[in-house]
Amino acid sequence: MSDKIEVARSVASHLLATEEAIDVAIACAAGLVGYLPVARQQTHVSAAVGQPAFEQVIAAMSVLGEARRRIVEAHSSLAESGRQARIPARNFGGFVDKPSHHAQSGMQVVAESRAA
């Protein structure tokens, strides 16, 4: 069983790193979108200048939002895979409490003291 737990721990580590990377990318893109109008004003150019780039960054944020939704869904699917593989529920270090809608879907939050 410990081999399964170690593999699950590794999967969780990769998953959490991916979730964090997507969140960082969204935050960076939001900063860019927020700064583009300021940059335009500081350079005293028409609003038309850079509009295509502005729209492309916003479109990229939309794709990042989709990626975030998908990785959250993958997280749920991986939890189900763990149950199917009979890996005991463990908290592998998620940095925030899970929202209540997960509890309604049959997922459970496991106390840190049970984590090994």
Image (cartoon, rainbow, N blue to C red):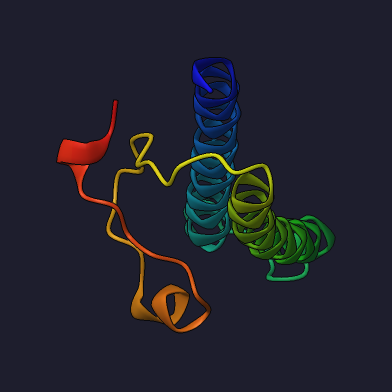
For this rendering, which residue is in front, 107 or 57? Answer: 107
Give the total of numbered labels.
Answer: 0
Residue at left offset 57%, top offset 59%: 33
Q: Position of residue 88 (x, y in %)?
A: 46, 42
**From what the image shows, is residue 44 above or below residue 28?**
below
Compared across the picture, whether 70 is left or right of 99 comes to right
Q: Tell me if I can see residue 49 in this picture.
A: no
- Picture quarter with the C terminus: top left
Q: Position of residue 98 (x, y in %)?
A: 35, 63
Q: Quadrant of residue 18?
A: top right
Q: Quadrant of residue 114?
A: top left
For this rendering, which residue is in front, 98 or 23? Answer: 98
Residue at left offset 52%, top offset 31%: 17
Compared across the picture, whether 92 is left or right of 39 comes to left
Q: Position of residue 105 (x, y in %)?
A: 53, 79
**From what the image shows, is residue 13 above or below residue 50?**
above
Q: Tell me if I can see residue 64 in this picture.
A: yes
Q: Position of residue 11 (x, y in %)?
A: 60, 29
**From what the image shows, is residue 105 above or below residue 78?**
below
For this rendering, which residue is in front, 115 or 76? Answer: 115
Compared across the picture, whether 51 is left or right of 106 comes to right
Residue at left offset 59%, top offset 52%: 83
